[in-house]
Amino acid sequence: MATYVFGHTTPDLDSIVGAISLSYLRNQLGLQSIASRQGVLNLESQFVLEKFGFDAPILKTSYAGEEVYLVDFSDKAQAPVDIMEATIVGIADHHKLGDLTTSTPLEMWVRPIGCSNTVIKQMFDYYGVAIPQNIASIMVCAILSDTVIFKSPTCTKEDTKAVKELAKIAGIEEYKALGMELFNVKSNLTGATPRELILRDFKDFDMSGNTIGIGQLEVVDLTLFDTLKEELHATLSQMQEDREAIMVLLTDIILEGSQLLVCANDNTKIEKAFHTTLHNNEAWLKGVMSRKKQIVPFLEEAYK
Ligand code: MG
Ligand code: MG
Ligand code: MG
């Protein structure tokens, strides 16, 4: 029986590339694996797969009775709805440990570093399997994207080392320029509705029984949002539903900070989390680039 390898709901580049790179490694090891995904490709993933000549992992949202290997998440909220009816054989991730449990032993490659594809690069090294040039190319892109071209506080020496080694295999000299290419693609807001923008990179978290939804858009110029903000606020309040709070981070990767737009039942919780004051449900969070490291832990503390 083949194992499905896939990343989180609303897949980002790390989830898509991780499904491809890890299923390749497992197949080389004689472990029959199929790369899949839980949702549509975002613009960045489309760009990268097309640039390096890959087909998208197959779209599959139901996994009852299947063996699965999870990449880039271990939270139920980011898993397929029938995940508890699947057998989780492994997890490769770089987030906080989520709330999924298993009834059988599994392998876990979880490290506090900048990208799941850095973890997967280390798996290739551990098993002594060579990485093909085209897979090395997309792994470089995934790491540059997740670490915001090494600017994110989640980025470690292991990530920069992995990029250097992978770029060598891929024959990519100007990897920082490639990174900027990715963020220019990500910065394209045209043709998307405010709802689509909020959902582009969106995750729900369970914080002490409260559902908190957090979207993030990483762009090269925050002024791109000047004419959109009003609509984004209106859309957040439409999308709040049963959530205790919903928010979107508008991250400027050049200024290295995020404008936070919030719709919450209790704004004081948000203000407490980030030691800030919300004006018109907004605050500038200087230096904040990482949802997993600079947003989620502080909200979890505030909602305890
Ligand atoms: Mg991810
Ligand atoms: Mg990731
Ligand atoms: Mg990210």
Image (spheres, grey):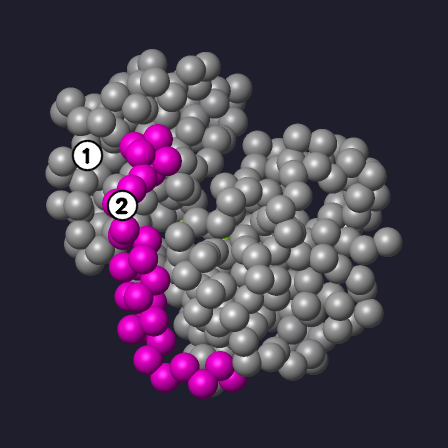
Q: Looking at the image, which residue is at 50% across and 56% down?
A: 14
Q: Amino acid at mark 1?
A: Leu
Q: Looking at the image, which residue is at 18% across and 40% down?
A: 225
Question: In the displayed structure, would residue 215 be above or below residue 163?
Answer: above
Label 2–label 1 contact, CB within 8 A: yes
Q: Estimate the x, y position of residue 228 in percent, counting from the top left.
A: 19, 34
In which quadrant of the rendered view does residue 237 lie?
A: top left
Question: In the displayed structure, would residue 100 be above or below residue 28?
Answer: above
Question: Which comes sooner in the sequence, label 2 or label 1?
Answer: 2
Q: Is residue 292 left or right of residue 234?
A: right
Q: Secondary structure at mark 2?
A: loop
Q: Is residue 78 left or right of residue 288?
A: right
Residue 162 in sight from this viewpoint: no
Residue corresponding to mark 2:
189
The numbered dot on residue 192 is none
Q: Estimate the x, y position of residue 59 in percent, counting from the top left.
A: 62, 46
Q: Which residues are magenta?
A: 169-198
Quarter of the image with the N terminus in it: bottom right
Q: Amino acid at mark 2?
A: Leu
In which quadrant of the rendered view does residue 155 lie?
A: bottom left
Residue corresponding to mark 1:
228
Give the prevailing secondary structure in the magenta stretch. Answer: helix
Return the residue nearer the eye: 52 or 295: 52
Residue 29 in sight from this viewpoint: yes
Q: Is residue 290 magenta?
A: no
Q: Looking at the image, which residue is at 71% across and 75% down?
A: 127
Q: Estimate the x, y position of residue 289 in percent, counting from the top left.
A: 30, 49
Question: In the displayed structure, would residue 287 be above or below residue 278?
Answer: below
Q: Is residue 192 magenta?
A: yes
